[in-house]
Amino acid sequence: MDRYPPIAEHGLIGDLQTAALVTSRGVVDWFAAPRFDSPSIFAALLDHDRGGYFRLAPDTADATCKQLYYPDTAVLVTRFMSPDGVGEVIDWMPPDTGPTATDRHTLVRTARTVRGSVRFDMECRPRFDYGRAAHRVELRPGASVFRAPGATAYLQSTFPLERDGDDLRGSVTLQVGEVAAAVFTVCGAEGGAPPAPPTLEGMTQELWDTVEFWQKWVRGSNYRGRWPDMVSRSAITLKLLTYRPTGAPVAAATMGLPEQVGGERNWDYRYTWVRDGSLSVRSLLDLGFVEEATEFTRWLGDRLRESEGKGGEPLQIMYRVDGEPLLTEEILGHLEGYRGSAPVRLGNAASDQLQLDIYGEALYALSEGHEVAAQSGYRGWKVLSRTLDWLADSWDRPDEGIWETRGGRKDFTYSRVMCWAAFDRGLKLAADFSRPADTERWTRARDSIIEQVMAHGWSESNQAYVQHYGGEDVLDASLLLMPRVGFVAPKDPSWLSTLDAMDRTLVSDSLVYRYDPAASPDGLRGSEGTFSLCTFLYVDALARAGRLRPARYTFEKMHTYANHVGLFAEEIGPSGEQLGNFPQAFTHLSLITAACTLDAALDGQRY
């Protein structure tokens, strides 16, 4: 067993409340429950010895491994090919489609032999609460149980199990056509009734029900463009990363995976960013998923209403999936981190940062399509209107910016651009729905911002819009959103020269860096890879600018960096390796956006 497989060597499964990663060699090395942001149960990805894992694979180390998704689903198939035979492990979690959160979540693993004879070994070694909580195991007929403070888990198997200390293991040899299964069910502290004994007939029906759920959902997409497989996989990934009871998407399924192996940029991304969720609305609407887009805007409206009358900022930049604002950051010093990348951080101190751009993204989300905007109603509008009144007094301040740097506040150009977008969209909504608003005040603020950006966010020497005021030589890929929100025309000479400057400074063989930390210190040691979100935003901007050949070539090349099942992490390293938390929602939503824009441009349509 590889102590630390490459980040890209994983597939994702989930039940719409939490998710697990499965390596291409059949090991579940990340799983937190009952929610995405709950304590981990399997976390060998962050510490092989202390984190815990669940392995189901052939006992031979020389088997060739292949992994794929059953078409248009979140059902993962891992294949093992050896001289003695060919075996498969099928992993899935039955989707929990109800609106109520539950403490019970089930991970189903079935093994079968399709050629010859294959012996499968199983090891189930949970480590509760990030490996901090001791557990005991009870080996029972039908449903063995792991008990830890605050958590209970059952393991059921159709083949014999035996104790290995406080863990469980077993093995079975399967001939062609034979099937075995192991079912891991996590419950709350009390545990509740043990799950019903699994039967192969029942699990087969459950598998096909899960397949039908996902394929039916994908059939709801209206995408008819050139890249259906990549777009569908990205849409499924966004759905998998969305907490069904509230409609809130998490930024990624994992925590602590490094932006540079051995470095300190290791963040917890299992929370809901206002920015990420807001930008996902356009991607979902582009595909016709109005219900998912509306659910997030409802969640966003709830956050604004909760802040009414409390003073301070109307929005935090991120929340827990249930809307809880407390995200205290701590170091899990007992975990060595992925390949020694410490510290492993739990929680996220950036939640306290001032990032004024989020108001632009929030209004962008609320204005994208009348189906989404209309659902807020009059009371929702009044909350939104008061938020813009607050922003009219508050936009002209330094902040930490979109990338959550820890190098001090600056007058970030992107933050000003998105404040402009907030007022621009607010004015359009007031007109479209004939709502009462202080439109004169909003108009003055909007116009003041554009005048300020043109005066201070433009570099004559670089002929480009820059990261922050006074930063003549510092470019920033976040500004690739400027034409999308309408701040500049996509073929404006100033924008085309900005694209040229970015190409010289931030682009490396079509991959795009966020910014240059050497030119704009961010308060952290080390470097990072190219940012996959930015590469897809670059494709979007090139397509809007009419530069279709480089746009399409960049987009096609980017597909070669996807992993074997079409998933992307946050970044791409110097040797093409995936880095950062995985899979990254921001990357997949921007892939959808880029595909839709590029399709429209290639078809000669307006977008």
Image (tube, rainbow, N blue to C red):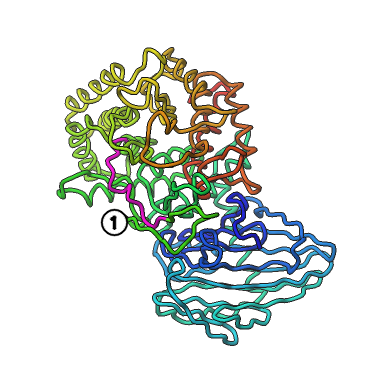
- State which region is magenta: 345-357
The answer to whether residue 420 is visible is yes
Residue 351 highlighted magenta (yes or no): yes
x and y, in percent, of residue 264 in the image? 44, 48
Q: Is residue 242 left or right of residue 511?
A: left
* 61 displayed left or right of 185: right
Residue projecting furthest to the bottom: 141
User: With 411 as the anchor, is 26 left or right in this view?
Assistant: right
Residue tagged 1: 326
Question: Callout 1: helix, strand or loop?
Answer: loop
Seen at 49% across and 72% down, the residue is 186
Amino acid type, mark 1: Leu
Comparing 268 with 48, the one in front is 48
| Quarter-of-image position of residue 498 | top left
At a point 51% along the width and 67% down the height, the residue shown is: 50
How many numbered marks does the figure carry?
A: 1
Above or below: residue 509 compared with residue 590? above
Toward which corner of the image does residue 602 lie, by quadrant?
top right
Residue 435: image x %, image y %?
22, 34
Q: Sort mark 1 into few (<14), some (14-19) or many (20+) by Cα contacts within 10 Å.
A: some
Q: Taking the image as drawn, is residue 209 in sight?
A: no
Q: Residue at x 21, y 49 (%)?
A: 307
Residue 226 pos. (x, y %)? 63, 33
Query: Residue sitting at 38 percent across and 28 percent down?
Result: 485
Asked if 606 appears above or below 19 in the picture, the reply is above
* Residue 394 shown in magenta: no
